[in-house]
Amino acid sequence: MTKKICLLAVLLCMMPSTAFAMHIMEGFLPPVWAAVWYVAMIPFVVVGLSSIKKLIREDPSNKMLLGFVGAFAFVLSALKLPSLTGSCSHPTGVGLGAILFGPWVMSVIGMIVLLFQALLLAHGGLTTLGANTFSMAIVGPFVSYATYKLAKKMGASRSIAVFLAAALGDLMTYVVTSFQLAIAFPAEVGGFTASFTKFIGIFALTQVPLAISEGLLTVIVVNLLSAYDSNTLVGHFKEGGL
């Protein structure tokens, strides 16, 4: 009897299942909108690839830090919390890379992170890769980068600037996700505005505390990196990314 129970437990563990864990899950968007967001992400990824080649050509040691910011985004964005049907909430982890290397580089790294999660972690999201890349790997990093530069220009300390950049980049990812869902699924009464209000209201409950947490964690990581290799990071902060 015990052997049968153990065998049943093993078989249950081996049964394939789909997690649908992307912040817009696999197959949720109508095909037209899935295609639109794929097309929209392509120019950013092309420029991002060129920026990465330039970074490595100028200093091959950048490969290690690029790998680290990719791993940081991979781990944080894999922490999924259910939020509403067809979607979930999670930290993004893209603010760190945007601050160090600029937003174009994170367009590529963020897309690769999402692709690996879809293929290796069975999170789904191949049909919605364009939409998820546009919100998390394009809009998020551009907001983080602009926020960091503006905060520093206004005289904020590095820690405050990093916190604001990471937190606002995280939040804007879900503002764009709400826009993407609302424009694809307008409400019968109230249309796009009513739908957007519903989506952003639900996301705010889960994403605001996640964004604050991500901002604090990014400050800690930047401080640890700076303590480990201050010369390299000082150079990146002076350049403010590419």
Image (spheres, helix red, strand yellow):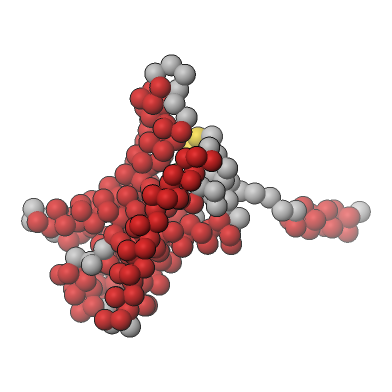
Check the image and report above or below for 116 versus 168.
below
Looking at the picture, tell me which residue is in the foreground, 50 or 197: 50
Extreme residue in the right direction? 1
Image-quadrant location for residue 13: bottom right
Looking at the picture, tell me which residue is in the foreground, 208 or 101: 101
Residue ID at (44%, 59%): 111
Check the image and report above or below for 114 versus 90.
below
Determine if residue 21 is in view: no
Q: Position of residue 104 (x, y in %)?
A: 30, 61
Quadrant showing the N terminus: bottom right
Q: How many marks?
A: 0
Determine if residue 103 is in view: yes
Quadrant showing the C terminus: bottom left
Check the image and report above or below for 178 versus 153.
above
Left or right: 18 in relation to 234: right
Q: Position of residue 217 (x, y in %)?
A: 33, 58
Q: Position of residue 40 (x, y in %)?
A: 38, 49
Looking at the picture, tell me which residue is in the foreground, 77 or 59: 59
Left or right: 34 in relation to 15: left
Image-quadrant location for residue 231: bottom left
Looking at the picture, tell me which residue is in the foreground, 184 or 231: 184
Extreme residue in the top direction? 189
Residue ID at (45%, 50%): 38
Residue ID at (32%, 79%): 56
Residue ID at (39%, 18%): 190
Q: Position of residue 21 (x, y in %)?
A: 54, 48
